[in-house]
Each structure stands twice: as C-alpha cells, then as structure tokens.
Amino acid sequence: MAQAPALPSGFELPLESRLPRIGSIDAVALEERAASLAKRSIKRDAKVWALELAIRTTDLTTLEGSDTPGKVAALSSKAIRPDPSDPTIPSVAAVCVYPNLIQTAKQRLRGTGIKVAAVATGFPSGQYPTPIKVADVRSAVELGADEIDMVIDRGAFLSGRYAKVYDEVVQVKEACGDAHLKVILETGELGTYDNVRRATLLAIAGGADFVKTSTGKINPAATLPVALCMLEAVRDVYDQTGRRVGFKAAGGIRQSKQAIQHLVLVHETLGPDWLTPDLYRLGASSLLNDILMQLRKQKTGVYQGADYFTLD
Amino acid sequence: MTDLQPIPDDWTYAPAPESREIVTLQPRYGHFVGGEWLEPSETYETLAPRDEEPLAVVGQATEEDVDRAVGAARDAFANGWSTLPGSERAKYLFRIARILQERAREFAVLESLNGGKPIKESRDVDLPLAAAHFFYYAGWADKLEYAFPNRQPRAVGVAGQIIPWNFPLLMLSWKIAPALACGNTVVLKPAETTPLTALLFCDVLRQAELPPGVVNIVTGDGRTGAALVEHDGVDKIAFTGSTDVGKAIQRRLAGTGKKLTLELGGKAANVVFDDCALDQAVEGIVNGIYFNQGHVCCAGSRLFVQESIYEPLVEKLKQRLTTLRVGDPLDKNTDVGAINSRMQLEKIEELVASGREEGADIYQPPCRLPEKGYWFAPTVFTNVAQSYRIAQEEIFGPVLSVLTFRTPEEAVEKANNTPYGLSAGVWTEKGSRILWMAQRLRAGVVWANTFNRFDPTSPFGGYKESGFGREGGLHGLEPYLEFDA
C-alpha cells in the first residue's frame, strides 16, 4: 500500500476508530464568522477581479443520468469561451463529467489547457466495494481524465470506521497516478462541523490534492460555514507541514454574490496564494451565466436579459 | 461603455463607504429641555475622530442649564408621567423602539462619524441592541407589580444619567428605557466627545410625541456632569464611565440619600483552555479586544492561555491580526475604526510605551494608518507579567496582553487577581469546566465560548471597582424603583 503522506503534527491520524487531537469546532462561532465575512462589500474593480477569478477557477459541471455526447460537447465549447461576444472573458479551469463522457470532453478541449475532471468511486453514494471503486478510478484515468473527484465512504465514516475511509483514499490516490485527486466529503451527510474537520484531515492525510465539499446531489451542500471549516483545516495543515492542499466548493452556488462570498472566505482565511485554479475551484453549472451577466453589467452599466447568454 | 480600472494582480477591496447623505446635521445644537431647544450660553465643537472634521457646535451646559433641565424633569414627573398607567408608558417606549429601527441607518452613520467605530458595528450591533432595549423595557412597564410581587414598586423620581463615549446611543437606551418604563423622568448627559446621536435622538422623542420634560438632554464635559450629580432635584444617579470619576461621584453622594448605580472600568480575563475550539477561540479573542477599537469596559484585555497551546494560539492570533482592516469607520469593510479622541489616543500610547519599557514583546500587524485623525494599530503584547501596568490598568484601546497558566486553579487565581470584576471569558469544549470556572470567576458576566455578547434580557454589571447595580433584564428595573413594602 502507498505510504501515507506527511501528517500535520498535532493531528495524529492513526488507523484506528478514534482520531484524537483533531481539535473541535464551535458551531455558533464558526457560523458567526462565516456570516460576518459574507457581509464584505465587494464593489467595482474588486468585483470584476473576483468574477473573472470565479470563471478561471470554475469546474463547469454536468452530472446527470441524461448527459449525452452532444450535451457535453456543448458544455466544453462553453468552457473554452464562456461569452462568445466578449473574448476578454477567460476560459474555465475544467469540465467535470461522468466517466462515460470523458472522451467527448477530452476531444473538444484538446489543446486548450482546460482539464477534464471525472467523478469516480461509485459517485455519488460511494456505497460500493473498494476494488470496484479503485477500478472505476483506473478506468477513468485510462480514458484520459486529468482530475478525479472521488467520494468518501460516508457509511464507513459515520459508523466510526475511519481506517476504511482513509485506506480508500490512499488506494484511490495510488490509482490516480498523475491525475489530481479531489476528495468529496459530502458534508451535507456528515452532520456536524466536528465531522467535517475530521473528514477533511483524514482525506488530506490519505493523500488528497484537493478537498471538496459536496457532490451537488445533497442539500445542504457548499454552505459558507462548511467551507470555512474546511479552509481552516487546510490552513492548519499548511502551517504545520508546509503542504498546500486545494479546496473545491461545489453544490448550491448559483449566484455571483455567493461565488464572491466564497472567494472572500478563501482570501481572508488562506490568503491570496490560494486564489488560483491550482488551489481553488468552484464546482458549478448555472453559476457561469450569472457571472457573465454581472460582468457585462459592470462593463456596460446595464443588465441584459437571460436570452443574451447561451444555455449549454 | 464605462472605462474599467486596470485589474490589479492582487485582490484589493475597492472602497465601500456608507453614504453620509442620510444624516442632516444642524450647524449648532442647544440643550433639549422641556421638549424645546435651549440656547446654550457656552459652546464647543464636536469632531469626527477619523479626520478631525468639525461636525457641529454643541452646548456646554452650565449649572443654570442643568437646573432648568432638572426643573423640567421634576415638572414632567409631577404633572402626569409618574401617574400615567404603565400600559401608556409602554406605548411611548414601543414607539421609540420602532422609530429607532426605521431610522437605524441614519443613526448608525452618525454614530460612526462622531464616535469613530466601524459602520458594520454601529449597523449590526449598536442600533439593533438600542432598539431591542426599548422593546424589552416597554414590555415591563405595565408588569412591575408582577416583577416585584407584594413589594409595591413605584418610580424614584428624576434620574440623572451620565453616559460614556464608547456606545453613545446604546448606553443612552440602556439608561433611558428602564427609567421611563418604571415611571421616572430623566436628565441625561452624553459624553463630551460623542453628543450627536443623543441630540438626534431628541428628534425621535418628538416624533414619538413623548410628553415634554420626560427626557431632557444636556451636553458638556465633566463640569456639566458634576452639576447634575450635585443637583438637589435629582433622586437617582446612574453613571457609566471611568472608575476614578465613579469614585468621585460616590464620595459626593455619600449622605445625600440619592440612589446610585455605577458601571465602571474593567480588565477582563479571557481564559483559553487547551481543549477549546482553537480557530473559534481566536475569533473570540479578536472580538473580545478589537471590537470597537477596544473601547469596551468589558473588553477581554487580559488573555490567559494554557501553556500547552500557547505557541499555536499566539501564532494563529498574529496571523488573524494581519487580516484586520483598519481604516475609515464609514467603510463597510472596516473591522477596526478610529480611536475616539486625542486624549484617549494619548492614554493608549502612554500605556503601550510602558509595556515596551517593562519588557513585554509587542506585535502589531503591518497596516497603513490614515495620517489625519486618531489611529492606533491593533496590538498584542506577549511575555507579559502580572505586575506590568498593561496587565493591571484598563487601557481602553486595541491592546491585548497575553499571559499563561498551567492549571484551572491557577487560571482562576490569576484571572481574579485584579481590582476589577466586570466580565470574563472561558474557552473550553468541556461543559463541566465552564460551570466550574463560572462559579469561581469574580465577574459580573462570564461568557463561555463567546465574548462581548449582549442582550437586553441579561443583567450586566460589575464586582469590586467595576461598580455596582445591574443594567438589563429584570435586575435593571430595580435601581429605578422604590419599594413601599
């Protein structure tokens, strides 16, 4: 089995059912801090900067049973040039799809630098035997995925079998090879912020390149307090080991205002270094058009109707 | 197409100032006596601490002015207010509360302008709480018999109230709401440096059609306060401010039969145990001492950290300080505003210099302070001994002293080792320890896993040199009542 990466000191993560010294989270104070950061007033050029960053860090996502090559091809074109009428608008960071559609996306995105991310490990439930999950990952990588979005086994986590969760992350990381690994915690199913913190550190100890809030299939998803809780864990790991782990907020972020609030959280928790697609992602689908609408408002002074933005 | 500014490499938040258009200031204010403006014989200028801009000319009330105000209050007390049914008094208080809510933005902007506190605090803390106090005490006005069963409560008479500059409108409502609910009339003196929201409040009183003379407001410095304290027509003095002035008031009132409540200084201990929720404790520490530039009598100015988490905690605290945004109080993104006055700034500077001389290590995050006005960077002293002045004296500024302890017993001993006793904080995930600490800390308020949290239903007040009497809650009615049984 792969060697577990360096653990942050003070956060001992033994392969046992208990994780001492993880620390705890005070829910009231956490939510208060998130709410106060959400009140930052981001205007004018700072707003444009944030909206463009939001586009550059977007994982443009479609994860439906009804996805087809045609749908994914259209989405990929949108990813390259989100606003056909304005070439100054940057491309998104990645397109996120089910494994069956990796090749379609790959073909469309060739030569653009936009990554293809695939969900794997029995997404979204993760309720499959470990070998099948690992095989799922191997196949996705073979099909050309640059990034793998895995889900943790919440059933194992909630029943206290942390070692199983950890082992799976380690095995999936190994199966990823050069592909980047994002570990989805599905925080909406974890119940407490203490669990969110514990799962974040567990995923990082297992080798996650990114930790990600949610699948997008469960509500609540990427709430601000959950994001803050995970960002603080990422900060602790960086402060104690120097290792930079990325963070992806996904699920329920539909408006520009929410995207800016998430970016403020990162900016004031981890600092400007994390404001890059290498360390930060926003998983979204309908968000992109709202951002384009806001950007055009900033540039022209007037809002334009939804019909002026492409639906893909 | 409007031209956009070139996009910066880093994310600098654009200025987001709250518009001050909403506030219309008179160039000159008198004293509010018997429902009319009394032309002052002496005046002074009140400033905006952020840039020393003169905002208005206000009166310096003389003994004569105070005498007229007390006379108006006596008349109003005798001619109707004291015999008005409680349910009728409540209507006025409810009305005042609602008007404050409606005009919240106007008051918030003026509070930040005249006092220097960040608009996000005046908007989200001062104004909502001020309105909440009026709502809360409005509810008691017709239930005093039930609050004090079989004791036949009745109003005291005329209350002379002297309030500080750190929460001008909020302290006004802490004082006026319970006094009126109990059937008293009031002469209130706002602090010398922050009279404007109290003067704007007179407009609210008129809007609410409160009978003339029930609330009178006189402005001025300590001389005005002394005249109010010594006036024979005053039955009760309520003072919030410094311990020195509080002691002087108590000496003057000895033997006069006047009732007195004092809410004075503090040097609160904020005790952090190693099993706390670390990041939230850091937030609480920051809120405890940098909230309102540390101009808070219950500020958590002495931080006691269990030695086993001293290093990570101080590291996190310093990191957090670098993200505090110090600047224009009217900017919606400002976390720490301007120091209230030149005098206060000099006092802070003096005490900080003493901390350096005595050998403590100082940390201040890099931040560019405006050139005009009164400013002080958020400051942390580590390596502080109990005997240093910065660990003993109230600084009333954004200055934190960090000390350590090893065991809960030692924490209690050190926390209580102060002449003050207004508030304290405990940070631990262990419920039993919270209770254990709360029983032993000699402080009027003990917060657990939070700090600087206020509610009108909760009594507030001190032990020892932090004063006596309670404001807020059911307890807050008692100083404004006499009991015939």
Image: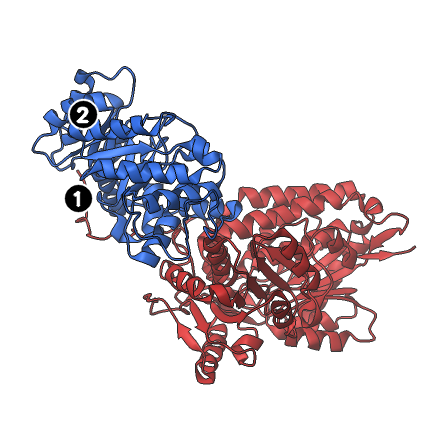
Chain colours: A blue, B red
Residue B18, how many percent across, how many down?
40, 50
Work out whether residue B136 or residue B85 is closer to the camera in this orientation and state it: B136
* Left or right, A19 with reference to B476: left
The answer to which quarter of the image holds residue B74 is bottom right
User: Is residue A225 at all visible to an observer of this figure?
Assistant: no
In the rendered view, tell whether residue A8 sits above or below residue A301: below
User: What is the three-letter code of the residue carrying label 2?
Assistant: Ile
Q: Residue furthest bottom?
A: B357
Q: Residue at x 38, y 69 (%)?
A: B364
- From the viewer's perspective, is the residue at label 1 or at label 2 nearer? 2
Work out whether residue B262 or residue A106 is closer to the camera in this orientation and state it: A106
Q: Residue at x 56, y 43 (%)?
A: B101
Residue B304, how many percent across, how many down?
54, 67
Q: Residue furthest front?
A: A1
Residue annotated with mark 2: A102
Q: Residue furthest right?
A: B485
The answer to which quarter of the image holds residue A146 is top left
Helix, strand or loop at label 2? It is helix
State which quarter of the image contains the C terminus of chain B: bottom right
The answer to which quarter of the image holds residue A282 is top left
Helix, strand or loop at label 1? It is loop
Residue annotated with mark 1: B3
* Left or right, A110 with reference to B348: left
User: What is the three-letter code of the residue carrying label 1?
Assistant: Asp
State which quarter of the image contains the N terminus of chain B: top left
Residue A89, how many percent across, how many down?
16, 36
Residue A218, how many percent across, how many down?
41, 27
Work out whether residue B65 or residue A267 is closer to the camera in this orientation and state it: A267
* Left or right, B94 with reference to B383: right
